[in-house]
Amino acid sequence: MIEPGEAAGRRYDLIAIGSGMGGAAAALRASTLGLKAAIVEKGALGGTCVNVGCVPTKYLLRVAEEVSDVRGMLERGLLEGSVRPRLAGIMARKRELIDQVIAWYLDYVFPSYEVDVIRGEARLRDPHTVVVDGVAIEARSIVVATGSEPVVPPIKGLDEALRKGYALTSDGALSLEEAPEHLIVIGGGPVGVELATVWRGFGSRVTIVEMMPRILPGMDPDVSKSLTEVLGFMGVEVITGSRVTAVDAERGEVRLEDGRRIRGDRVLVATGRRPSTRGLGLEEVGVELGPHGEVLVDDHARTSVPSIYAVGDVTGEPYVASKAKIQGIAAGENAAGLDSRYDASLIPMAVYSDPEAAGVGVSARKGDPGYIVKRFPAAVNYRAIASERPYGIAKIVARESDRRIVGFHMVGLNASEVVNVAAVAIKLGLTVDEARDLVFSHPVMSEVFLDNINLLLGINVYLPRRG
């Protein structure tokens, strides 16, 4: 990494503000096309995904699942002894994995493409100038990739509870070295659900409180319903349609609008994220923002200012690294003079809970006009049974007029992987009749996609005959 003063005299073709998935993708792609690129980072290299997102959460989820599996085998008499996770060691290993990813990029990837990484806080002065800690650095194109930050809602007593450590944001919940006896999660979105299953796996009693009528309100309703049922079976209490009105750190409780009081050792605030755009000087240079502070971009990842691009969480929902990557690549290519577009309509959504939930494309229910909808129980999949995770559903959505597959939604083992098969089928415009000819290896979870299609076509080799 270099200091801002070292970059002052250099002329860059592209400067990315933020070193997360989107900023790194933009800088690296531009570099492969012959552009001189730099990245400015004020915080931890790698952004949300590496430090408090993709890497740490998925590691903790895996360990929590393994701990839960071992406990299950102990209860069934398949193993002898006991298991008690040593969270200090687990968190230390998490940090090692994060450091490995950072070192890979900082020591090998970025230097190999001669991408400069500048340490400091950036602000736009004009469409071609970034000021980093008071030092002006010029670039032909600028990519804003500053990510997002947790939202702290205006709940009575919450700020005090956060100061005292009784309440935590999602970032803080990734570093606990002792499992709470009872964790209360405010917010049933992807982050809240994922972290609820992490701490349930480590032995905590967990309660999720969601103000909307269902958890995962942005996903398919059948997915929300199925996951709620499975979470309940696994011991996670889910309260929906109820707003938290107060957090009392002294009493160790949260209060709901219906008068209920829930006592707990810790409170996790997982009420969503918002784009990190404050203090960048975007509006001063003419960059248009949306109603939630998100940077508005077209399908070239270009903002209202032609020389400025924006990628990833800073452009608003969905807050997923896969969107940041495709936007970053498009921005890097367009900065090099290409005409690159990205398609945001088929970005799969995945929640890496236990079990996982995922979806892509159209969400529809049986009976909705214009669509053919069929559900298949993922619980009968042989891989799910062998993995002792026989639960969940899969749902296929086809357009009635031409029988093309337009949506797929799932709860179950490896749903985050299976949904990608469906995304390819939708992108290729396959009909259910054409997809019937596909053959997958057996047993794998992706078979639920084909079994779902077969069931829609009247081909049933797993379920009892009805009627």
Image: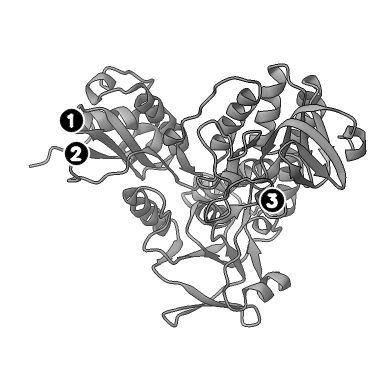
Residue 431's x, y, as percent? 25, 24
* 166, above or below 457, in the image: below
| Vertical arrangement, residue 432 with respect to residue 68, above or below | above
Task: Name the N-terminal-most of marks 3 and 1.
Answer: 3
Mark 1 sits on what residue?
401
Residues at marks 3 and 1, CA–CA distance in whole angstroms: 49 Å
Q: Residues within 10 Å of mark 3 (few under 14, many from 20)?
A: few
The residue under the point 45% across, 37% down is 348
Is residue 170 at least partly visible in the picture?
yes
Helix, strand or loop under label 2? loop
Query: Sequence-wise, which precedes: disc 3 or disc 2?
Result: 3
> Disc 2 or 1, which lies upstream in sequence?
2
Whether residue 444 is visible here, answered yes or no, is no
Q: Residue at x 45, y 60 (%)?
A: 235
Position of the N terminus, as image quadrant, is: top right
Q: Is residue 394 left or right of residue 265?
A: left
- List the residue tagged with mark 3: 284
* Residue 315 x %, y %: 57, 44
> In the figure, is residue 380 to the left or right of 356?
left
Q: Vertical placement of 77 versus 321: above or below?
A: below
Structural distance between the alpha carbons of marks 3 and 2: 46 Å
Q: How is the image coloured?
A: one colour
In the rendered structure, the answer to whether residue 201 lies left or right of residue 8 reads left
Q: Amino acid at mark 1?
A: Ser
Which residue is found at the position 61% from the left and 41% from the top?
54
| Mark in front: 3 vs 2 | 3
Q: CA distance from mark 2 to mark 1?
A: 7 Å
Residue type at numbered disc 3 = Glu
Considering the image in quadrants, where does the C terminus appear?
Answer: top left
* Image mark for residue 370: 2
* Circle 2/circle 1 CB separation < 8 Å: yes
